Amino acid sequence: MLIFNPLKSNKMYKKIISFILVLGIMGGCTKAPTSEVSPTDQYATGNYPASMDDVNSVLAACYSNLRDQYLFGFDYLTKMMANATHTSDGQYGAGDFGGFVAINTLSPTNGMSGGVWQSLYVGVKNCNVSLAADDSYAAKYAKPGDLQALNFARGQAYFLRAYYYFQLENLFGEDNLVNPSPTDTLGVPLFIGLPTSLETTQQPRSSIKAVWAQIISDLQQAATLLKGQVWTGNDIARATEWSAQALLGKAYVFTKDWTDAKTTLLNVIQQSGKTLMSYSDYRNSFIGDPTYEFNQESIFELNIDPNSNGDYGVYGGPANATSINGLIWSPYALGGDGTEQSSNPMGYGGNIGLHDVNVLRFGYTLGTYTLVNNPNFDNTKPASFSNPKLVMDPVYKAKALAARSNGTVDPRLYVNCVQPWLDSLQWAAPTSSSWYPVSRPSYIFGDANLSSEFGWGMRKYASLFNNIGNNPEEGNNKYILRLADVYLLYAETAAATGDNATAVEYLNKVKRRAYNYPVDAPSPVDYTSLTSTTSAANANDPVLGNNPLYYERWAELFNEGSWWFDVCRWHLGASEDALYVTARSLNGAPFVWTDKSYAWPIPIGEINSNPKVATQQNPGY
C-alpha cells in the first residue's frame, strides 16, 4: 500500500499534470486505434484513478503546491509579507523586491505578486482536478468500503481550495478599499470545475459576495466530510474538520458575520481538544525542532523537511519539496576569531533583517549595546570565542537579561528575534559543530551606527542550526492556523458584538501564555479594557499603543504572514508607514502610503491573457 504524506511527497507531480490534460478533454475522447501507442507519461481517465492510492496521489498536488517558490517555499513570507508589513527591513530594494519594500510602488508587472496569483490558482486547479478524480473513481471503481476514505479526500480538497481562494480574495479582491464606489465590488475569478474549453478558462472577476460564499460553502463541506477523522503517523499533516472550522470562523470574521463567527470559533475552542502550549514550548516551535511539530496548539501546519541532497531549496531537487525562508531571514554569527568584523551569515545574508521599530514595539527600551575590553582576555593566546578581546558592557548586559525575566518587555520579542551577543546560533560547519554567540549583522546592519540602530536578527522561521555552506535548507514547519489565532478572532468577535469582558479575557489568555502565566487565571499582566496600554506605547505607537486587540494580533502572529490582512481590513496602512518611517533600501526617504495598496493589482499576465478581466483592474493601477 502506498504510504501517503501530503506534505512530504511530490512524486506524483508529472502523473497529476498529465491527468489534468487528459481529464480536461475526456468528454470528447474516442478510443485510439490499436496500432497507436499511448503516451507513457499520461494516464487515461478510463482507468485512472482506479484505487484509493491513486485518489490520494492526485490529492498530493493540492498540498505540495503550498511549498511553491512564490508561496511558502520562498518569496511569499520572506520578500512580500515581511517587507509589506515592515517586519523586516530590506537592504535590497531592486526590481520586484522593491514593490514590497515600498508597497505604494507595487505594479501589475511585478513578478512576485504575479507569481502568487499564478501559484494560488494552480492550487485551485489542483483541487478541482482532485475533486474530479474523486467523482471519476466513485463512478467507476469505488467499493462500498471506500466511501469514508473518499469523503476524507474530498474534504481535504474542499478545505485547500477554500484556503487558496481565501488568500486570493484577501490579496486581490476589492474587499478593503477605502470609501468604495458602487462599482467596487469585484472579487477574483471563480473556477469551481475543470475547464472544458479555452473559453471556460477565461472567467471574469466574480463579486466579492460570490467569492466569500464559495469559500464558506467549501469549508462547510470540508468540515462535514472530515468530521471525526484524526490523522496520525505519516498522515498527521492532513487537514481536519478543525482546520476547516477554524478557517471558516476566520472567514466569518473577515466578512463581519459575527453571529456565525461566534458559534463556529467557540466550537473550535471547546470541541477541538486544542490548547495553548506553554511559553517554553511556544518559543521553540518556530525554529525547526521536530519535537514541537504538530503540537496541541497546531490546527493546520505546513510540513517542511530539509532536502537531504543539500542543494538550494526550491531551486534544486524535488519540486515543492522544501523551503528556503530561513536562509533569507538568517541572523549573523560572530566571526571565528571572536570579533564582529569577521561575522558570518547563517544563510543567504545581505538582503533582509529585522526592522528596528519592531524591537521598540515589543517594549524594549534599553537602546543599543556597547562593547568594552574583556578584563579576562589572555593576550598570550589568539582571540577566540573562549578568549574574546571585547565583551558586551556588563552593566548593559545585566539590564538586558533582567528585561527578559522581569516582564518589562513582551517575551514574544525573544520568540521572534535574536539579540546580539546574548542569543546563540549553532554554526554547523561541514566538519565541526559549535555554539557561536550572535553578532550584529555585518552587512544588513553592519554599517549601522549602534548609537541609533539595534542590529537584532530574525528568529521565527530563521535558520539557527545550519549555515548555507553546510545545508541550504531549513526544516521549519509553517503554521497556517493555530489556536492562538482562533482565540484572538473570538476576542474580536466578542468585541464586535458588545461583549467586551469576553473579548478582554481571550486577549488575556493569549497574553498570559506569552508571559508564562497560567492561561485561565488572572495575572499581573492582564489588560483591564480594550483600550489598555500595550507594549507598543514604547514605540510611540498612536494606534497599537492603546489597542490590545490590534497589538495582540501583531505580537502573537508576528512574521507568520497574517498581519498584512489585518492592516488591510482595519485600514492601518498609513499609520503603519508613519510609524516605521523608512527602509534601508530607501536611504532615509519616507514610506509613502497610497490606499490603492489595500488591494494588490491584477497581474499584467492575467490582463493580457484573459480578455474578460482586461477592464477589471483594481482602482489606482
Image (cartoon, grey):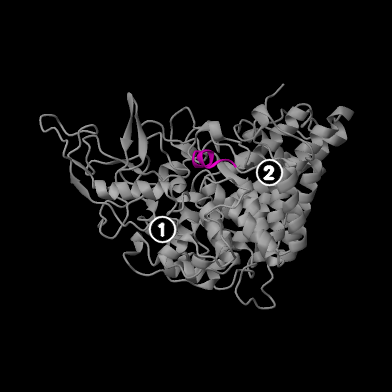
Element type at mark 2: helix
Estimate how packed mark 1 is, as few (under 14), some (14 to 19) or many (20 or more) residues with alpha carbons within 10 Å. Answer: few
Q: Nearer the viewer, residue 572 or 522?
A: 522
The main secondary structure of the magenta stretch is: helix
Q: Which residue lies furthest to the right in this view?
A: 144
* Mark 2: few/some/many CA within 10 Å (<14, 14-19, 20+): many
- In x, y percent, where is residue 230? 73, 34
The magenta stretch is 277-284
Q: Can residue 167 be seen in this view?
A: no
Task: Residue at 40% x, 34% y: name it.
Answer: 466
Residue 49, image x, y percentages: 77, 32
Question: Which residue is depicted at the point 37% across and 62% down?
Answer: 583
Kindly tell me whether residue 579 is visible in this rendering.
yes
- The amino acid at mark 1 is Gly
Could you tell whether 19 is left or right of 427 in the image?
right
Q: What element carries label 1?
A: helix
Q: Which mark is first along the chain, 2 or 1? A: 1
Residue under label 2: 126
**What's under tag 2, amino acid-wise?**
Asn
Q: Which of 41 and 411 is in front in this view?
A: 411
Which residue is drawn at the image coordinates 43% and 36% (left, top)?
Answer: 312
| Residue where numbered disc 1 is placed | 95
Judging depth in this view, the residue of 594 and 403 nearest the camera is 403
